[in-house]
Amino acid sequence: MPKIVVLPGDGIGQEIIPEALKVLKNVISQKQEFTFQEYAIGGTAIDKFGKALPEETLKACQEADAVLMGSIGGPKWDTLPAMERPELGALLPLRKKLNLFANIRPVKIIPALLSASTLKEEVVKNVDLVVLRELTGGIYFGEKGRNTQPPAAYDVLVYTEEEVRRIVELGFQTAQGRKKRLCSVDKANVLESSRFWREITEDVAKNYPDVELTHMYVDNAAMQLVRYPEQFDVIVTENMFGDILTDLASMLGGSIGMLSSASMAGKKGLYEPAHGSAPDIAGQNKANPLATILSAAMMLRYTFDMNEEAERIEKAVIKVLNQGYRTADLASSTEKAIGTKEMGDAVVAALS
Ligand code: IPM
Ligand code: MG
């Protein structure tokens, strides 16, 4: 029986996950038997078990076929020592221990949301890109520390050849299934790790002559993403550049509340919205559950090969947006916003 582990986490995670589960259970009900098991992670786990990533949670995730996560973190746990906080104490070790090296974040414009973008319609209307972010290496995972004399701090950015090769290969394969254009983003004019990344990318490219490869510096990529985003098909990049560029790219689609995310190790995946726990609106039924609902669709597609069901969810999301349903992050000053639950209900209703 396929096993899905559910990690609501902190803040709005507790509100968006039930909506995604509602949609997911509705879509798969007739098909297959899935088990859903919920575990604690992040601040919620610190409060309950004294640890951001309890053994039990980790073990369940290791044994699962897929993990559906909400979001973690919040001001309540910000004062803890760095390595105990939800981010460094739970999310990063979870990514590392499950070997989830490939993070997929697609940005495709939904016409009904064109006016929600802060950019001009003609700039964003044809955007259909995917960012492939390396997720278990680079500066997030290199040595970090402090010196006392003189006072200093450091985070080391290191990549092994194997780490670069496997993500870049996936980049080429992803491009092959799309418009066959791969843009590798780096900072090779300054960083040795980027020159290394570029060399390996050029080498991998020999096996994919049908894909057009370009290289772009990360500062230029940030500028190009708002200047002429249509030029991109697949972007492959290292961990921190990918973190920054995906937040930026999410706004092309109108809101970070729409950006879904899959972190993969083969068929196994952790699926979560790209946004955070939004403590400012937590517990108020205001959060947009669509990124999580769309992440659940990615789960059906990537882990369970249930393309038809994934499409049903994606179509239902488009339908509710066409019908004019908006959560607060998407609503203009003249549009009426609905709540998290109401949005979830609308998607379920749109499935049939
Ligand atoms: C993301 C988030 C995380 C990251 C944080 C919460 C550690 O911003 O998934 O993009 O930096 O990877
Ligand atoms: Mg981020």
Image: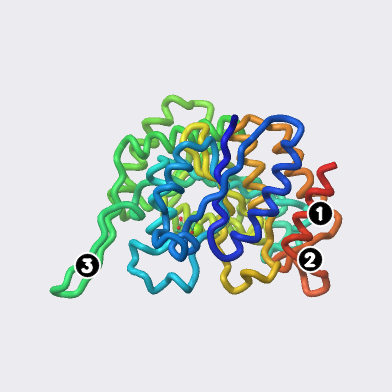
Q: Quadrant of residue 234?
A: top right
Q: Which residue is rendered at x = 46% and y = 59% of the image?
A: 45
Disc 1 marks a residue whose amino acid type is: Ala
**Which SS class for mark 3?**
strand
Quadrant (top left, top right, bottom left, bottom right) of the N terminus: top right
Q: Percent x, y for residue 233? A: 59, 42
Q: Point out the tag, 1 or 3, that comes first from the N-terminus.
A: 3
Q: Which residue is mark 1?
A: 346
**Which SS class for mark 2?**
loop
Disc 3 marks a residue whose amino acid type is: Arg
Picture disc at residue 173: none
**Which SS class for mark 1?**
helix
Residue 149 against residue 244 in the figure, above or below: below
- The answer for how far apart the CA atoms under marks 2 and 3 are is 47 Å
Q: Which residue is rendered at x = 31% and y = 55% of the image?
A: 190
Q: Point out the tag, 1 or 2, that comes first from the N-terminus.
A: 2
Quadrant (top left, top right, bottom left, bottom right) of the C terminus: top right
Question: Is the residue under label 2 in contact with that under label 1 (CB below 8 Å)?
Answer: yes
Disc 2 marks a residue whose amino acid type is: Ile
Q: Percent x, y for residue 9? A: 53, 58
Q: Which residue is mark 3?
A: 146
Pointer 2 local density, CA inside 10 Å: few below 14, some 14–19, many at least 20: some
